[in-house]
Image (cartoon, rainbow, N blue to C red):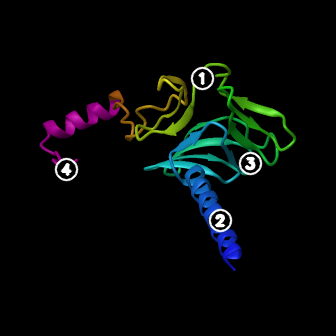
Amino acid sequence: MAVCLRIATALSLAMLAASIMSATVRGGPVLQQGYELRAGAALRNGPYTFIMQYDCNLVLYKNTRALWSSRTYNKGRNCVFTLQYDGNGVLYTGAGVALFATNTYGRNDGAHFIIVQLDGNVVMYNGARKPIWATGTYGQSFTQIKPLDAATLESLQLAESAGVRSDSP
């Protein structure tokens, strides 16, 4: 009876640990070396989602707007993005063909990781906490404001000079 209880307890703890590790990879903002994102799995932080899509495209979204992608749409099946121990992040097809890589092979000096930051950038840091790769989407955390074209600016100036002006934003 005591042996059965110990086995059941050990099994429960193993299942709990596996579910915690899986939840971290699927829902948290960090991918650690040796872990992978399979189709449908994502890293999330605030409005940002870095997801390995079923169409083999690795994409960073802000809410529903795509900010960055690996440009591997429909180039394979059963794709997986893995953060290898050699420092490289690689997107493989189910057949083992590499479609995309961060080209950071050998640049890690310890336990490197990828994180989805709240500034809109996905960054790989090496063990010394130095960035060695990024999506380059820093600063896209706010809506980009376009400058007014000359015709619109002139129209607004005419309206203001004619006394037709709105103080609302």
Q: Which amino acid does label 1 sit on?
A: Asn
* Mark in the foreground, 4 or 2: 2
Residue annotated with mark 3: 55
On screen, residue 117 versus residue 56, left or right, reads: left
- What residue did someone put label 4 on? 168
Q: What is the secondary structure assignment of the residue under circle 1?
A: loop
Residue that numbered label 1 is attached to: 108
Q: How crowded is mark 2: few (under 14 residues within 10 Å), some or many (20 or more)?
A: few
Q: Looking at the rendered structure, which numbered label has been put on residue 134?
A: none
- Give the image location of residue 143, x and y in percent: 38, 41
Task: Work out whether mark 1 precedes mark 4 in sequence or the reverse, and give the earlier one.
Answer: 1
Tell me the element at label 4: loop
Q: Is residue 100 above or below residue 16?
A: above
As rendered, which of 87 and 148 lies closer to the eye?
87
**Amino acid type for the residue under numbered disc 4:** Ser
Is 40 part of what is drawn in magenta? no
- Cα distance between the residues tagged 2 and 1: 35 Å
Residue at the image position 23 percent from the left and 47 percent from the top: 169
Give the mark nearest the N terminus, 4 or 2. 2
Between the residue at mark 3 and the residue at mark 1, the CA separation in whole angstroms equals: 29 Å
Residue lying farthest to the top in this orientation: 106
Query: Separation of disc 1 and disc 4 at Cα?
Result: 52 Å
Q: Mark 2 points at which residue?
A: 10
* Quarter assignment of residue 133: top right
Do tag 3 and tag 4 residues touch (Cβ < 8 Å)? no
Q: Which is nearer the N-term, disc 2 or disc 1? A: 2
Label 4 crowd bin: few (<14), some (14–19), many (20+), radius 10 Å: few
Q: Are marks 3 and 1 in contact (CB under 8 Å)?
A: no
Tell me the residue at 60%/23% (across/down). 108
Residue at image location 27% in from the left, 36% down from the top: 155
